[in-house]
Amino acid sequence: MTAIHRWPWPFLLLLMGAVLATARAVPAFAVSPTLVLAVFLPPLLFDAGFSMRAAAVRRELPWILLLGVAGAVLTAGVVFGLLSAAGIPWAEALLLGAILAATDPVSVFATLRRLHAPERLRVALEGESLVNDGVAVVLFVVALSVVGRRVLDAPGVVGLFVWLTGGGVVVGAGIGLLARRMLGIVSRPVQIAVTVAAAYASYLLAEWSGASGLLAVIAVSLILGTAYQPTTHHHVHRFWRQLGFVVSSVIFLLVGLQVRLDEVVGVGGRLLLLVAAVMLARALMVTLVTLSRGDLWPWSWRLALTWAGLRGALSLALALGVPAQVLGQAEILILVFGFVFVSLVVQGLSTGPVFQLLGITRQTAVTTVR
């Protein structure tokens, strides 16, 4: 039992689902992309945003934005280029680049805290994960529009990206500020209901206006996360953390049930290519973003940032969100499943030893210089 506890629970859920699907122990079924995007993703993103500490985010905001925004776009572009050059169909390569642009290092955070990793490194990883979750969702929607021939030229792609991003943030900020005022006048038991209503209302309103509903949810979560006294914040945060855990567990199990292990073996060559492309893109992105400030980002920290870039629930949810009529949809789901599976096992289990090997402890923290 102790040995089992060492394995990441998402990996165990993925494996259990895949074993059941491979053994034909459950009937085949399809998961609605709308269900995944509208029901499952808002709690995941709200939980991540609500748990961020505003003061720490403000201190590291430039690096969070660089890693989260520029980093996600650069990673998606490099992955697309490498996969296309290797002969992967362009539509499949474009969607894979967007889906795997988002890191999901939630399972690493506990390890970082146990190792007393420097706060700035930890906050940069957490903030990057939150920001590039939103950016990856926008890239995914843009990629689907390009693949579906709804947007064909560069100005159209840029315009769609700007509208999805700006519109989502504006809608989320508006509802977040309104909900924040309501939290000051309602009783404590009602406050959880207010946050739930705000999260889903922001998603629905933004989607209705053609903007990114998931970016709106992130904006709401960041605003409401700073609206509480510590005791109340803990009460509401515990609810969202539990809901996020349940939703992410469902996603890992659902994806596992959609993929058979023999199918993963069948795409083994492409999976290894995908792993190599994403890891190379991650290393290149971290190097380029941090190259100008070697005093703040020594090579040990850069290696840590690269290795801690796990993929998880969001990538799986986006893969489930690819419509069945998209060419290569089945292979995309299998490849993302395989990638997350490898990421959770290899990176998830080795992050602690790698950080210890690099000597990253609180005592090695580099003094912040602005």
Image: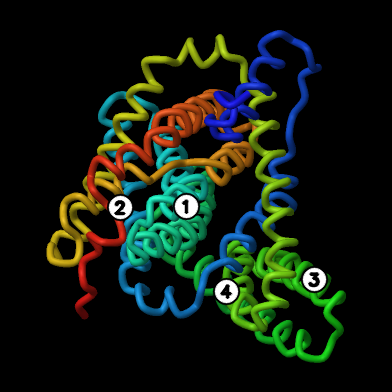
Q: Secondary structure at mark 1?
A: helix
**Sequence-first disc among 4 and 3:** 3
Q: Is residue 318 above or below residue 118?
A: above
Q: Quadrant of residue 339?
A: top left
Crowdedness near tag 1: few (<14), some (14–19) or many (≥20) residues, C-alpha within 10 Å? some
What residue appears at the point 60 percent right and 38 percent down from the top-left corner? 322
Crowdedness near tag 3: few (<14), some (14–19) or many (≥20) residues, C-alpha within 10 Å? some
**Sequence-first disc among 4 and 2:** 2
Residue 287 lies, in percent from the top left, at 19, 52
Residue 292 visible in the displayed image = no
Type of residue at label 4?
Answer: Leu
Residue 222: which numbered mark, if any?
4
Residue 329 lies, in percent from the top left, at 57, 29
Determine the CA span between mark 4 and mark 2. 25 Å
Determine the CA span between mark 1 and mark 3. 25 Å
**Sequence-first disc among 3 and 2:** 2
Residue 109: which numbered mark, if any?
1
Number of numbered markers: 4
Type of residue at label 3?
Answer: Ile
What residue appears at the point 53 percent right and 31 percent down from the top-left corner? 6
| Location of mark 3 (residue) | 192
Please indicate whether residue 140 sits to the left or right of residue 30 in the image: left
**Sequence-first disc among 4 and 1:** 1
Type of residue at label 2?
Answer: Leu
Q: Secondary structure at mark 2?
A: helix
| Location of mark 2 (residue) | 74
